[in-house]
Image (cartoon, helix red, strand yellow):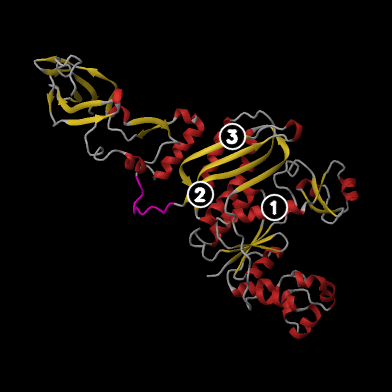
Amino acid sequence: MRLWIGLYLPRLPLDVFSPHWSAEAASVVLESERVLAASALAQAGGVRAGMRRGGVLMLLPEARLHEREPAREAAALQAVAMALLQYTPQVALAEEATLLMDVGASLRLFGGVRALCRRIRASLRALGFAVRLSCAPTARGAWLLARGGAGHALGMVSLKRRLDRLPAALPLPARPFATWLDGIGCLSLGQLRRLPRPGLQRRCGGALLAVLDAAYGMTAELFDWIVAPTTFQARLELFDRVEQADALLAGAHSLLLQMTGWLCAHQLAVGRIVLLLEHERGRVARVPTVLDIILAEPTWRDEHLVRLLRERLTKLSLEAHVIGLVLEAPEVQAMAVPSESLFPEPGGSEQDQWRMLELLVARLGPENVLQAAPCADYRPELANRWVPVQQARRAQQAQMQLPPNVLSLPRPAWLLAKPVALLMRDHRPFYGSPLRMASTPERIEAGWWSQSQTRDYFIAQGQDNAHYWVYRERIAGADGDSAPRWFLHGLFG
């Protein structure tokens, strides 16, 4: 099934993260001294599109006026397109702040067209844009439905019916001839299509016929798809100085959405992100504040990253105002293949467990959440160390670095911090009761020079049937006459 989604962003001329563009401010964007867009409060005060600057100031003297910035609009549209790459790799820029997406191959993945449209709307809201969305079997048809606010058409029959009711001057090639079309009584696209094609081509040119044929599915359409860059770095300039760190979450979320689209376009997962909080520049310049987040499990979804950033920003105390945000993804790797397990793992998947640990690290600090990391050493007291969970290697990688045959040997659940010297009674080691050796010896020789260890380990059993891990030094005392000493090193559960 071939299906296109058209996205028209009617508020694109506004900087979406400007604190002036809010329900509490009457903000107006001007182009050539005329109103291009206005906030809800400004519209309530009587401001309308096309009104002159003087008329706006007469109605609302306190209104905040902004000049249109095409360069920032293009950058904002590119950011939106980058975020939409998480839904389909086929995203194209179209005329008049409109994006086109070929989502035919993505419908099953996202649960159908309705669920996909809801997710796209939610992403656009998180980015700060109002969107007029449409669906159609053709790309140009989706563009016309989005620009005309005509809704969705999932089949060719309904598409033709909806297109026929749209204004005749809606296509770009028809706008220079709007007066002529109105004069001959041609008011809709359906009436425009019924005009003689040779005469319409001589009067309006072949571009208009090409647009109509593409919209009604009579000709093929070609597009230049958005290509994601090889590396990711996104920047957001704030309109005002932000004093509270938690107020930066909305802007950081928009950058994370762009990174999510970039990761999906390249089939990558991110293992570490860096958020730079930019402060003043110039003579009073300050070094940016760095938030470095290392993930225990690489991911390509933004929901978990937003939770981590919320925890970090809530605890952060800003030393200076923030005027901009920069997000980087310095460590990425290929996406992990989906789990082949038929039944869900008890207690959640491994990814869920890693996400929980990452939230604990963000809330308690990396120095307070530790994990055992095996080391490639035969000596039991040196075979493990406690490191922050973010730096711990995966279990598979750690096992690969262990000495051979270590994992198959019995080890106690409780290893003493320091071995305890045992008394000898009747030539047998004594710990509450005489100990009986219940296993063959395991010989360990490791270390260099003064740190060398030469031991024979046994599993010993007491009269209470408790099991202990004991060892005997293979090297006798310094004089050569004393018997080897015995030590308790661990207890079995």
Query: Helix or strand or loop: what does disc 3 sit on?
Result: helix
User: To which quarter of the image does residue 483 belong?
Assistant: top left
Q: How many angstroms separate mark 1 from mark 2 (CA)?
A: 23 Å
Label 1: how many residues lie within 10 Å, few (<14), some (14-19) or many (20+)?
A: few
Residue at which label 2 appears:
300
Say which amino acid is labelled 2: Trp
Q: How many angstroms separate mark 1 from mark 3 (CA)?
A: 26 Å
Q: Is residue 385 left or right of residue 404?
A: right
- Residue drawn at (38%, 52%), measured in percent from left and top? 339
Label 3: how many residues lie within 10 Å, few (<14), some (14-19) or many (20+)?
A: some
**Mark nearer the N terminus (1 vs 3):** 1
**Mark nearer the N terminus (2 vs 3):** 2
Residue at which label 1 appears:
75
Q: How many angstroms separate mark 2 from mark 3 (CA)?
A: 21 Å
Instruction: Using the image, determine if residue 481 lies above or below residue 28.
Output: above
Viewer-side residue, 434 vs 166: 434
Instruction: Using the image, determine if residue 147 lies above or below residue 479.
Output: below
- Residue 465 position, x and y percent, is 14, 25
Does the magenta run of residues contain 250? no
Quick check: can you spot residue 11? no
